[in-house]
Amino acid sequence: MQAMSKNLFDLSGKVALITGGNSGIGLGFAEGVAKQGADVCIWGRNTEKNAAVVEQLREFGTRVHAVECDVSIEAEVDRSFAQTLEIFGRVDSCFANSGVAKSGRFEEFSTEDWRHVMDVNLDGLFYTFRCAAGHMKQRAEAGDPGGRLIGTSSLGALMGMARVEAYAASKGAVISMMQALAVEYARYGVTANSILPGHIETAMTEDNYANEKFANAILPRIPLRRWGDRSDFEGIAVYLMSEASRYHTGDSLLIDGGFFLY
Ligand code: NAP
């Protein structure tokens, strides 16, 4: 039996790669793990947002860099992963979190929008995890096992939400992918889990929550009585990156203030 260390949540010396880390939930992940001592590499397309968040995260005293990357472009992901390894030397946890949402009546939904959602939310995860899993396997074979793959899915993967079929399908696929990865990479000491955010106030959802009709319909159904915010994702990121979760794999963790239950 290998006993847990005294400080279960210490992430010093570990490196987190967080796609979509310059905003919202991804930024919450980044803030949580940086506070516990992790070095952080953010990927996102927007140079200004990347630069602002790097400044902000450096205040926690760890190494932080951003790489400009569109995760829907295979070659960019390969290049960005290589660049991340050049900067940090390793990736201990990979949070594939970049995502987009498009809504519209199903019979009018364009193929272009369908493809865009799949390109970012599904293909983007595939390209990202292919790099990360390969790297973690190589390390395990060289005597350095471990590694964490964390995919951002959604409550929308579980609930019937009208007019977001593409988004829901892409997020359901994330859960399936993480379960398969959990089994395939367990032999290398790598865990794989999905996080399913509920109704979280971020740039992606601000229009919905500003809509009184939407807020009146949804808020009373959240048992914890508020929208989630990015700080609600710090703890789960730390847990999944830490030694505390070393035997926890293939799971789908719902962070929704109890909405799904009620
Ligand atoms: P957000 O604040 O809009 O963040 C989205 C992030 O994804 C940004 O950092 C954005 O950065 C990045 N991104 C978008 N397209 C990208 C691309 N092609 N390549 C690389 N990065 C890209 O929204 P959020 O709510 O935090 O969303 C984060 C994740 O949580 C998404 O996967 C979303 O589906 C999921 N989620 C959110 C909620 C919610 O209620 N907010 C609920 C369930 C699931 P750039 O624009 O700089 O590229």
Image (cartoon, rainbow, N blue to C red):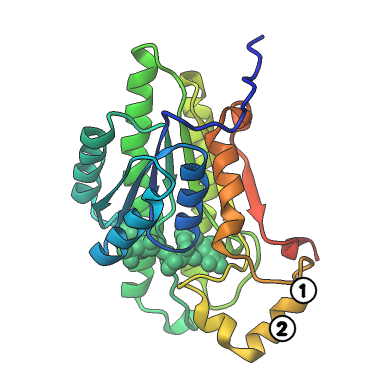
Q: Are marks 2 and 1 in contact (CB under 8 Å)?
A: yes
- Dividing the picture into quadrants, the one containing residue 198 is bottom right
**Horizontal relation, residue 50 to residue 144: left or right:** left
In the rendered image, the quadrant that contains the C terminus is bottom right
Dot 2, how many residues are within 10 Å of its Cα: few (below 14), some (14-19), or many (20+)? few
Q: Is residue 118 visible?
A: no
Q: Please, what is the three-letter code of the amino acid marked with disc 2?
A: Ala
Expressed as whole percent of the image width and height from the top left, the position of residue 218 reads 70, 78
Percent position (x, y) of residue 203?
A: 45, 73
The circle on residue 6 is: none
Q: Up-down: is 38 above or below 175?
A: above
Ligand 1 is within 8 Å of the C-beta of the residue at disc 2: no
Quadrant of ligand 1: it is: bottom left
Give the x, y percent position of residue 105: 50, 83
How many residues crowd mark 1 within 10 Å: few (<14), some (14–19), many (20+)? some
Viewer-side residue, 219 vs 127:
219
Quarter of the image with the N terminus in it: top right
Left or right placement of residue 259 versus residue 81 in this view: right
x 45%, y 55%: residue: 26
Q: Is residue 50 above or below residue 241?
A: below
Q: Does the residue labelled 1 lie within 8 Å of ligand 1?
A: no
Assign a secondary structure to mark 2: helix
Q: Which amino acid does label 1 sit on?
A: Arg
The circle drawn on residue 217 is: 2
Tell me: 52 left or right of 106: left
Task: Compute the Cα span from label 2 to label 1.
Answer: 8 Å
Q: Which of 185 and 229 is in front in this view?
A: 229
Residue 22 drawn at (x, y percent): 37, 59
Q: Which residue position is annotated with label 1?
A: 221
